[in-house]
Amino acid sequence: MTKTPSVEPSAVAPPNALTLRFAADLVAWQKQHGRSSLPWQNTRDPYRVWLSEIMLQQTQVSTVLDYYDRFLQRFPDVLTLAAAELDEVLGFWSGLGYYSRARNLHRCAQLVVSEHGGVFPTSALTLQTLPGIGRSTAAAVASFCFSERVAILDGNVKRVLTRVLAYSADLAQAPAERRLWDLATELLPPAEHMPAYTQGVMDLGASVCATRQPQCLICPVKNLCASHREGRPESYPVKTRKLKRSSHALWLLWAQRTDGAVWLERRPTRGIWGGLYCLPVFDNEDALSQALPAAARAKLLPKTPFVHVLTHKDLHLKPFVSQLTPRQTLAAELTAPERGGAWFGPSAWQVLGLPAPVRKLLESETESGT
């Protein structure tokens, strides 16, 4: 019989003093030292907060900034986003990665319009029923925009709370994470302070309470922090299960006609680059070669291979270029209707949702003029 993992004894309720002082000290610090210059801050527009939260998942702030502004220029509100074609949304998302976020973003906007009259729900529980919105994202929108007393628990917040509480339960175990949600909820301030508190705990984790070498001397809650008293804040959070990095080699067929059009096909929804247009992908060079007419195989030219780094995987990409005449056609399996392939000229592929490395390849060719 499998034994259910238990939460360690250290995961006790926070002391009354901590419950009373933690939020107050954090709110006071945030108002004086917290971040306030990011474009999605100082707003209670749920559309903008939601968009920023989705973009910031697994993505650095510095990367998101340009995408966020550009996205809002084209899709300034949920009605505009819902009415857009998915291909255009993916085009504006191209390069941010984790493309299921963009597909869920588009579908979520459509449901907000069709089921909620174009107005975002005000409760975290209802927000969680929408595509792509998990518990923490729903809480961020509800807290920032509607002052609901709900806790967020992203990576930065987990680090702050586990250190303050010296919470040594293994967050790789679901019961331990559920207990941390409960403890996070116990530390919440009154509703009127929720926007500042939520921003404050996020800011603290993103700056002072860093993963390595936390700046405990300037931390506003150091006198309340159990791990600081222990002298070992970097021991928290505890999470034993780690994803191992892997690598994968892919061969890319860059088939190009003399008029400059390239052959692109839509990737399956599941898997890498799901739903995007892409150069045809193969597992080896022989399979790639067989997709070309016999007369074109002898002129197949390799380009410099390169590595595209994902969060937990390195993609070793090996592009090959083939120049085709208007009369030459690709193999039947590549031109089958279910693959969604077509020839796209430069003005057409530039607005498609493309994987970042494929876009860079095609743009390099355009810039070189070859």
Image (cartoon, helix red, strand yellow):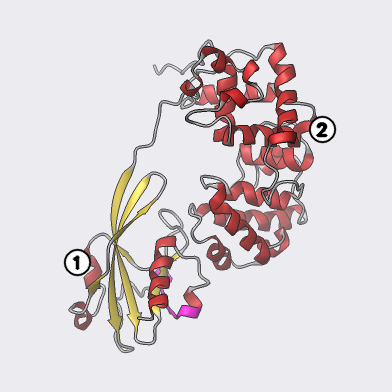
Q: Which mark is residue 116?
A: none
Q: Position of residue 46 (x, y in %)?
A: 73, 49
Alpha-carbon neighbours of circle 1 within 10 Å: few (<14), some, or many (≥20)?
few
Spatial CA span between label 1 and label 2: 64 Å
User: Looking at the rendering, which quadrant does residue 308 occupy?
Assistant: bottom left
Q: Position of residue 130 (x, y in %)?
A: 65, 47
Residue 68 position in % (x across, y down): 62, 56
Residue at 67% in and 58% down: 110
Question: Crowdedness of circle 2 by 10 Å Cα count: few (<14), some, many (20+)?
Answer: few
Residue 337 visible in image: no
Numbered disc in front, either 1 or 2 = 2
Task: Look at 40% across and 29% down and name the residue there.
Answer: 241
Q: On the rendered image, what quadrant is the C terminus found in?
A: bottom left
Can you say which quadrant of the picture contains the N terminus? top left
Find numbered disc 1 in the image and state the secondary structure of the residue it sits on.
Answer: helix
Residue 192: assigned label:
2
Most extreme residue toward the front, as rendered? 217
Residue 286 shows which numbered tag? Answer: 1
- The region drawn magenta spans 337-347
The residue lying at 50 percent from left, 79 percent from top is 347
